[in-house]
């Protein structure tokens, strides 16, 4: 039977990765191979390429269907931390079509399958089947400047959290009975050291942004939103590689974990909430700007006040403001336009 699709599902971890080969024919019949395991290093990556050439029904060297050799080989993997990056870059360099998906997509797909167990072999099979049944989008390596900004902004955020933790500890010690002076002294020294590092990193971030004139101007343009500073925009575009793979607002909301989940069935009406199954770095970046926006941005303030009247928890209203700001950043970035407070009125005057 003539093959129409070939997929390699990859379940990757820090030290190793497991793959399974899958094919789809004209009758929509799937065939998934036994698992193969490799080390997550250059040696293991090269062994993967050699194995691809040895799988007879996959590479079609011994198959009567010679046209199968021209079918694109898709390699599907999850965006698990940073573990997938080395393999993804390696495969793209070797002319393979790579698709990187959020873990929750494959996880939700796996729930529809009969096998409810979870092992590396089963996860690789689930990813292979997901790739065979779904339309895959090619992953493109982000420009190096976004990769560098992503590393630096995450380091900066980690230091901020550490400094806050130390400040809280010092605050607690200041109210404790006869706190150890040496402990307090070391904590203060540690705090000052981290603050110096944070200053150095933030200087490095701004220098990197200023090295790219177009990127710098675009960040300044988007930072015209009241309540949103340059660092917020930098963190957002770094996490999304300049929104390179984002096609619409709904996709961005889902990627950030701001997509809405409804819990309603029959007479049961549960709580409506956001999924939080997405990039938590983006949600973290939008929290403080949302607090600032409800004070200084009239549109955000109106939204917050309106939702506070209908929602028992004010945090829900704050999350809605954060989501709105994120989508606004995306729109202005794509259009490369400055923020206009009364956009609808300005548009009418212009027309």
Image (spheres, rainbow, N blue to C red):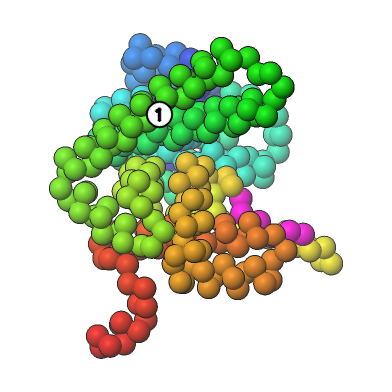
Percent x, y of residue 46: 33, 16
Give SS at disc 1: helix
Residue 273 magenta-highlighted:
yes
Foreground of the two, 169 or 92: 169
Residue 276 lies left or right of residue 64; in this view the side is right
Percent x, y of residue 264: 75, 62
Foreground of the two, 64 or 98: 98
Residue at the image position 40 percent from the left and 39 percent from the top: 99
197 shown above or below 220: above
Foreground of the two, 317 or 117: 317
Residue 248 lies left or right of residue 284; in this view the side is left
Residue 283 lies left or right of residue 339; in this view the side is right
Residue at the image position 44 percent from the left and 65 percent from the top: 296
Residue 206 magenta-highlighted:
no
Residue at the image position 38 percent from the left and 44 percent from the top: 235
Tell me the magenta residue range. 270-275
Disc 1 crowd, CA 10 A, few/some/many (<14, 14-19, 20+): some
Residue lying at the far front of the rendered structure: 178
Q: Which residue is mark 1?
A: 195
Percent x, y of residue 226: 38, 63
Observer able to see residue 145: no
The N terminus sits in image quarter: top left
Q: Using the rendered view, name the quadrant where residue 316 is placed.
A: bottom right
């Amino acid at each position: 039977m003539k093959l129409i699709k070939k997929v390699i599902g990859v379940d990757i971890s820090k030290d190793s990765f497991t793959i399974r080969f899958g094919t789809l024919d004209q009758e929509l019949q799937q065939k998934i191979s036994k698992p193969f395991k490799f080390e997550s290093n250059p040696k293991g990556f090269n062994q993967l390429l050699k194995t691809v050439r040895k799988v007879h029904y996959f590479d079609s060297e011994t198959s009567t269907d010679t046209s199968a050799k021209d079918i694109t080989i898709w390699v599907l993997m999850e965006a698990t931390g940073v573990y997938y990056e080395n393999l993804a870059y390696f495969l793209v360099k070797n002319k393979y079509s790579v698709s990187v998906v959020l873990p929750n997509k494959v996880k939700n797909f796996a729930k529809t399958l009969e096998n409810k167990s979870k092992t590396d072999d089963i996860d690789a099979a689930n990813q292979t089947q997901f790739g065979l049944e779904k339309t895959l989008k090619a992953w493109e390596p982000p420009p190096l400047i976004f990769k560098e900004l992503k590393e630096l902004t995450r380091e900066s955020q980690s230091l901020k959290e550490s400094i806050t933790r130390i400040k809280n500890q010092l605050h607690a010690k200041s109210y404790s009975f006869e706190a150890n002076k040496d402990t307090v002294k070391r904590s203060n020294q540690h705090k000052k050291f981290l603050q110096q590092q944070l200053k150095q990193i933030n200087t490095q971030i701004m220098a990197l942004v200023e090295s790219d004139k177009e990127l710098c101007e675009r960040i300044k343009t988007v930072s015209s939103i009241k309540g949103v500073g340059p660092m917020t925009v930098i963190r957002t575009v770094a996490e999304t590689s300049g929104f390179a793979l984002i096609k619409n607002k709904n996709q961005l909301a889902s990627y950030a974990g701001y997509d809405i989940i409804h819990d309603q069935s029959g007479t049961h009406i549960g709580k409506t909430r956001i999924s939080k199954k997405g990039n938590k770095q983006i949600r973290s970046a939008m929290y403080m700007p949302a607090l600032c926006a409800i004070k200084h941005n009239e549109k955000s303030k109106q939204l917050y006040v309106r939702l506070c009247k209908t929602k028992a928890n004010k945090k829900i209203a704050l999350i809605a403001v954060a989501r709105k700001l994120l989508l606004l950043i995306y729109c202005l970035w794509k259009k490369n336009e400055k923020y206009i407070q009364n956009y609808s009125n300005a548009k009418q005057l212009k027309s």
